[in-house]
Amino acid sequence: MDHSFIKHLAKPADTKIVLMIIDGLGGVERKKNGPTELEAARTPNLDTLAAEGICGLHTPAGPGITPGSGPAHLAVFGYDPVQHQVGRGVLSGLGIDFDIQPGDIACRGNFCTVDEQGRVTDRRAGRIPTEMNEELCELLRTIEIPGTELFVKTVKQYRFLLVIRGLESSHKVADTDPQEVGKKPLEPEPLCAEAEKTANTASEFILKASDVLADSSPANMVLLRGFSSLPDWDSFTDVFGVKAAAIAGYPMYRGVSKLIGMEVLETGDKPEEEIGVLESNWNDFDFFYVHIKLTDSAGEDGDFDRKVSVIEEVDTLIPRITALNPDVIAVTGDHSTPAVLKYHSWHPVPVIIHSDHCRRDNAKEFSERACMAGGLGPRFPAVDIMPIILANAMRLNKFGA
């Protein structure tokens, strides 16, 4: 994606666009020859959009590459995730409106559970409630490390934000999350010589956190991931020429939206609340990003049936979107989170582009198998989604004479 090229072609238009990202939408069959979560769900309204639109499967970061939520979202937003890399720390900080300053090093923390041998038994400490998180963050705020200023903030449930200020060091430090249970937390290894002070500070913080959390249950340890600093990127509005609003309840997704210059609207976590925010702000913006989180949570928990249920709930809300008469409706996921894997995966993600100007294909339903045969192709780059949306919204000029 060449932003300067798209910026040159983008033109204003009196058209409205809705991009719904159903987090972790893609799945795989739980039984041989059985349906995926999306295929098992009753989705008459999404099926109608698919039958009237054009479908395909996108890859966020390339064939076989399993992306995190940050790069996967950036790819759908038209930012090459390899060229535009930023850790979860900055995204989490922006998502809770923390004033991250140039030079700050931010990372996202997970409260986790470890056994007597120090092995991780639960990477999310049973998804502790946010109220408990706030109490634990008070304990972590007692930690002091000479030469630095530390900020510890609650994000949501088991997630917290750590910001290190005053180090004058690189953020390039490896995550301490082993990504699976039964293993001990990893050391925060520096990934370059300039990051040694950051790694040492993180090690000291973890050691002191272990002491202050020793008597807590189930959250008796921390995992740090996504060490990052503020990048300097083109804004979404400047590149694509739209006045964009983000409707997302979870801080990380609010953060990635804010990072690229979208206006983040206040909303609750529930899908019906988010659609209500869309309706009440319809006249104020021409591009709306709506994020649905609970599909991803169900997939990560290995709960196939709950993921099906969330997809079905989202489907019931589609008529409220179509009633607004947007010029383009795009529905996709940022990545796949199959319940059978309990984690993000490399599988291509279903996508619908619906407009009066799309070239309809033979897809009659919204499913992995139907989208595999769709007109957008069985594996196209996610960064191509935004230009296709803009073209269908009549917002791109002709290239060349």
Image: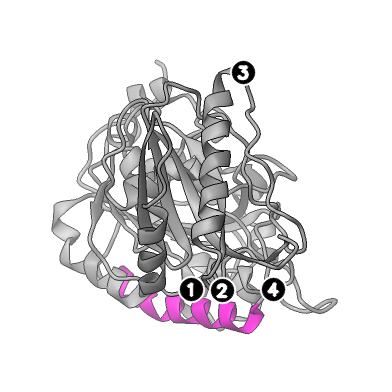
Which label sits in the foreground, 2 or 4? 2
N-terminal of the two: label 2 or label 3?
3
User: Disc 1 marks which residue?
Assistant: 128
N-terminal of the two: label 3 or label 1?
1
Q: Secondary structure at mark 3?
A: helix
Distance, label 2 to label 4, CA atoms, is 33 Å
Image marks 2 and 3: residues in contact by CB distance under 8 Å: no
Which label sits in the foreground, 4 or 3? 3
Quick check: 178 left or right of 310?
Answer: right
Q: Secondary structure at mark 2?
A: loop
User: Disc 3 marks which residue?
Assistant: 193
Report the residue that reaches farthest toward the right: 32
Quadrant in the picture for the C terminus: top left
Q: Is residue 333 above or below residue 392?
A: below
Q: Secondary structure at mark 1?
A: loop
Distance, label 2 to label 3, CA atoms, is 36 Å
User: Disc 2 marks which residue?
Assistant: 218
